[in-house]
Amino acid sequence: MDVSSIVPNRLFNDLAYLWPVMSPPQEYEEEAACWRTLLSQSLGPGRHPILELGVGGGHNLSHLTDGFDATAVDISQQMLRHSMALNPGVKHIVSDMRYVRLGRTFKAVLIHDAISCMTTARDLSSVFTTAATHLKPGGLLLVSPDYFADGITLPLIECRNCSGSDIDLTYLEYAYDPDPSDTMLDVILTYLIRSSGGLQIEHDRFQVGLFARSTWRKLMHSAGFEFSERSFHLPVQDMTYTILMGILR
Ligand SMILES: C[S@@+](CC[C@H](N)C(=O)[O-])C[C@H]1O[C@@H](n2cnc3c(N)ncnc32)[C@H](O)[C@@H]1O
């Protein structure tokens, strides 16, 4: 099978029903605690208005909604449907994070792993401009890229089995760099989906952004943010987790 014959981005479209099985909300508890710490430290007490761009299934956000008044944007109606069910108190909007303009400001803009869907410096800059447009000076931008070009060892390979109430899912994820001169990785996914209907095998592919730390710093600074980097140790996942932080000048 030629890679180019694989339909891209299926996980956020016809295969979006797999998202809660593949990446269940409870697995975000540790990460969300880091987001909560940074939000609380920066914003202080109160139920502040926050905006998440690329909310997906709202799994990370589901751990923050009790303390914040959230609005959420995603380009995929199928993914937003998951978040609407999980986060009924949140206002949901279908739109592109590069261009959405809601005509109001928030105390903080969050962009979790969805920022990895931006594959060029131009797209990243557009998203940071969106964030700046929805903040007042002193407002907070939090971003957590999945990948940094610095020190990455490729290919990245993950194989997992996860069970939902009526689906048993095994998937293989393979991330590689077919063109080191650009700013993206290709990710190939194979899903083995067992349900009462039998075993179904599906393929998927994505392109994700791969930028050096210096590029994140430069682009956030150009969009008007004072940049800093916060790292946390996640004990359950036994990994270092990085959130990029911008304060609008
Ligand atoms: C990995 S998922 C996010 C999962 C989310 N962190 C959660 O907790 O469930 C990435 C999301 O980014 C969204 N996305 C990709 N490009 C986008 C864009 N240009 N504008 C808005 N959302 C986008 C996808 O539709 C997808 O829902």
Image (cartoon, grey):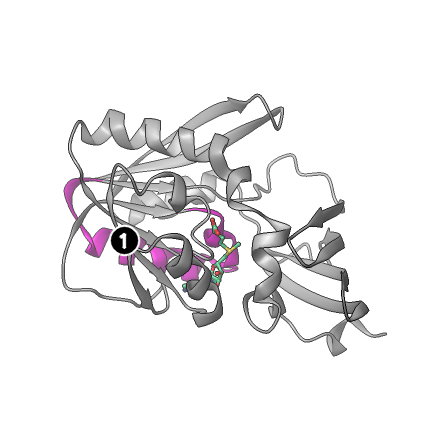
Q: Please identify the quadrant where the C terminus is shown.
A: top left
User: Can residue 54 be seen in the rendering of this structure?
Assistant: no
Q: Residue at x 42, y 35 (%)?
A: 32
* 79 inside magenta stretch: no
> Which quadrant would residue 96 be assigned to in this image?
bottom left
Which residue is label 1 attached to?
Answer: 89
> Which quadrant would residue 13 be assigned to in this image?
bottom right
Residue 221 vertical position relative to residue 56 in the rendered view, above or below: above
Q: Residue at x 73, y 55 (%)?
A: 169
Q: Residue at x 29, y 39 (%)?
A: 66
Furthest-right residue in this view:
1
Report the side of 161 relative to 40 (left or right): right
Q: Residues within 10 Å of mark 1 (few under 14, many from 20)?
A: few
- Viewer-nearest residue: 40 or 109: 40
Q: Residue at x 44, y 46 (%)?
A: 112
SS assignment for the magenta stretch, majority = helix
Residue 214 vertical position relative to residue 182 in the rendered view, above or below: above
* 122 inside magenta stretch: yes
User: Can residue 153 be seen in the rendering of this structure?
Assistant: yes
Q: Position of residue 65 (x, y in %)?
A: 31, 43
- Which three-letter amino acid code belongs to the residue tagged 1? Gly
Q: Please identify the quadrant where the N terminus is shown.
A: bottom right
Q: Position of residue 202 (x, y in %)?
A: 75, 69
Q: Which region shows up in magenta?
A: 112-139
